Amino acid sequence: MTIQTPLSEYRFDPDAEHGGIDAGFIAVEVARLLHDGQASAVSEFLQTLELADIAALIEELEEGDDLAAMALMPLHDQAELIGYLRPSSQVSVATRIRKRDLVALMTAMSHDERADLYKQLDEEAQEAILPALSKAEREDLRRLAAYEEWTVGSVMTSDYAVLQPDMTSTQAIEALRSQAIDAETIYYAYIVDTERHLLGVVSLRDLLTARPRQRVGDIMDTDPIFIRVSDEQEEAARMVARYDLLALPVLDQDDRLVGIVTADDAMDVSEEEVTEDFHKTSIVQPLEISVAEATIAMLYKARIYWLVLLVFGNIFSGAGIAYFEDTIAAHLSLLFFLPLLIASGGNAGTQSATLMVRALATGDVKPTDFGWLLSREVVVAVTLGVTMALAVSLIGIWRGGPDIALVVAAAMVAIVLMGALIGMCLPFIFAKLRRDPAAASGPLVTSLADVLGVLIYFGIASVVLELG
Amino acid sequence: MTIQTPLSEYRFDPDAEHGGIDAGFIAVEVARLLHDGQASAVSEFLQTLELADIAALIEELEEGDDLAAMALMPLHDQAELIGYLRPSSQVSVATRIRKRDLVALMTAMSHDERADLYKQLDEEAQEAILPALSKAEREDLRRLAAYEEWTVGSVMTSDYAVLQPDMTSTQAIEALRSQAIDAETIYYAYIVDTERHLLGVVSLRDLLTARPRQRVGDIMDTDPIFIRVSDEQEEAARMVARYDLLALPVLDQDDRLVGIVTADDAMDVSEEEVTEDFHKTSIVQPLEISVAEATIAMLYKARIYWLVLLVFGNIFSGAGIAYFEDTIAAHLSLLFFLPLLIASGGNAGTQSATLMVRALATGDVKPTDFGWLLSREVVVAVTLGVTMALAVSLIGIWRGGPDIALVVAAAMVAIVLMGALIGMCLPFIFAKLRRDPAAASGPLVTSLADVLGVLIYFGIASVVLELG
């Protein structure tokens, strides 16, 4: 059977902008085919797509059409597809399909993804599913779903490959072959004793290159990198990246293997972590879900806290201006330079803070590097300040004469240096206080720099102009 | 032989802060052992460490000691270790070891890492090495080193595993076994014709689970995800993450396989990309190397451009103030609220901009989502503005009476809405102009919001207070 639509010409095209597929365009065609009773054409087309692209397509389809399209896929593919959908779409699909289908789907899903889905379901749906699962699956599901959101436990999966130390490499490869259907990865296998204590890790590559009769116990790495189930999930992501791992074993406090964190899940965690850092550095508090899915109330809650706090912080800038009211009244032309000067302090500070926040997050610099970084920052900041002072003194001469130009230039150097030092130091202070350096946000640095900027500018002005 | 130092108790400890090792502490012990002639103790200790940790250790050692420690490792480990060192350390090691050792090392290194190192060497060192390499290695090196820094070609590697379509799965596994020493990964293998056109991709997992006599050509995915060698490297990182790949094949314009991008290299690319985005959103232009390694001149160059540009931008805020000089002179108490109001516009705008920049970067929202995002933003911004207006009007009554309170509250709602809309729209405008949305930085948004904030505040003030 051939497809008589533009879909037949549609295939993955990396030369198209951003690669992938145009899900919106395809969804219209797929919906039309489904309504025309050409299900087998759709089925054929879906086979040419990657799961991530099918997920994008499913999310574009109307309710009903999405289930019809999914039903055309083999169960195993459906189970994998679910993991590519947004959490809200997963729940939407799970609550609309028949309970029997949901049980089949959840049985076939990877253990970590089904636990994530399970957690999102309401209590009623949860209790409808549990009895239909096998005892082992039920216990696995309950256990994985119980870990707190920020822990390694919440991102690990329990479907890892296991080997015994006295197997030969040939037997081990045979064992992995039989575990390949269920295991999340068979490229790393874990060797445990009868109490599931982790004895070692072996890669399929090492098994393949070993002599056929060599024992797994002699090939395995007996001192493997691991993480604790109660550690922070970001730490797992950092370790996967640092040690270039495909999967990281997770141990409980008694050194028993309880799961693995795969590289692709680690990548997702580190993407979430980066998003959180981005938000923090612009005074948005962590959102539980994606920006696209966040409600107005969630966005309000994430944003209002720091906005109001900084309003009160900026009262001090206002108070600084009020303090110098006489000087300002006598030299109103000073006001022209106020925005430009205090903005420069904030801008230089924002630069310094972000450079440090990011370098600390990637491990590019360490808290102990503070000393030499500070001295380098002073040199950079003074050079920046002098350049900007030159630019601004020209405007100063034009707007207010040499006295004003002098005041403005001197204030610029001092303010840029002050802003840069605040921005540079704040992330390290936060790190020292065991808080996230990312909280040293641009807006916080800018507010601090504003207050001091007002004092520096009018302070210099009152001294120079009153002497003059 | 046993080690009579604290090192014997030193092992990987995930319960220690940040996991990994304390390289600084270990370096002192290792240096002492090397100077005491206890090389074999060091050698034994190094075997207990992961390569990433040995790299951290090597960078802490003095010149001379680092080479002595490296020399204790097998050549194959040394070759892999090099890739974990910072670029500047790689060059430092390469220029200090004997040419013969460097040639041996570079022959054993993975193809992408040695091309990166080669590019960093000066011309003299490059020309000293080339003749000592085999013809094939020389050509591979020249070819990989020739790709521009931002392309897929510059991050791909050419040591991938290759299979023929008419092999049985058993023969294919045997072939991978023999390629395991050289290939960067054997978990994905690539099937090419005699002209190296990519026919398909097969995973080792699929080969293992296939029937022994099944042909590779019948198992392989004949429509695999791929990327072009001249595409942007970020695109490769995005595809690896989107499709959960361990490696992504790279084709030239004639559909010939020229390399693969592995997942760990993709992770490095996306980390660099995130760093660049962080810097852009705080008006730091891309640094070629890490912040820790950047010189004062590099930092100055990356920071001065936007700082000076925004000084001139802020002249408009100054001009706005100058325009309302009469109103201000008549009501100097207005100045108290100036910093607080214009900062609020900038802060709300920074939040909106960052939320959008990051959501666009992750694909969480698309440029076509602009409409509904804008309407949601209006509601959120008005709610935020009203909350802040309530807070600030209390201060207004206390500082300047009901008239001032009214002016300040009205200005707050208008300024927060204006700031949020600028922050929300700018990333989409940049995307539309095919520029990086990340250029919609906090400081740029803040500067725009400052200018309009001044006009809104004093505009409202002059109307209300002059009527009153």
Image (cartoon, coloured by chain):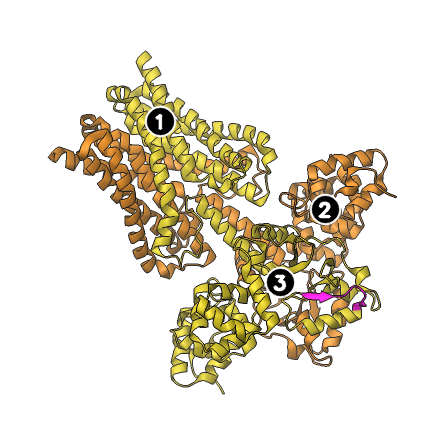
Chain colours: A yellow, B orange
Left or right relative to A372: residue B168: right
- Contact (Cβ within 8 Å) of mark 1 with mark 3: no
Q: Position of residue A393 (x, y in %)?
A: 36, 25
Can residue B158 be spotted in the picture?
Answer: yes
- Kindly report which numbered mark, 2 or 1, lies closer to the viewer in this rendering: 1
Verify whether residue B254 appears in magenta: no
Q: Quadrant of residue B252?
A: bottom right
Q: Residue furthest top?
A: A467
Q: Which residue is mark 2?
A: B127
Label 2 sits on what residue type? Answer: Glu
Mark 1 element type? helix
Q: Label 3 marks which chain's residue?
A: B
Residue at the (51%, 44%) spot, across then down: B286
Residue at the (37%, 38%) spot, across then down: A309
Mark 2 element type? helix
The residue stretch that appears in magenta? A161-169
Whole-Å distance between the Cαs marked 2 and 1? 59 Å
Whichever of callouts 2 and 3 sits on the residue coming sooner in the sequence is 2
- Kindly report which numbered mark, 2 or 3, lies closer to the viewer in this rendering: 3
Q: Position of residue A417 (x, y in %)?
A: 46, 28
Q: Residues within 10 Å of mark 2 (few under 14, many from 20)?
A: few
Mark 3 element type? strand
Verify whether residue A166 appears in magenta: yes
Q: Which residue is mark 3?
A: B247
Label 3 sits on what residue type? Answer: Ala
Q: Residue furthest left?
A: B467
Which of these two is toward me, B279 or A315? A315
Q: Are marks 1 and 3 on the same chain?
A: no
Which of these two is toward me, A212 or B172? A212
Q: Which residue is mark 1?
A: A454
Q: Label 1 marks which chain's residue?
A: A
Q: Position of residue A290 (x, y in %)?
A: 43, 57
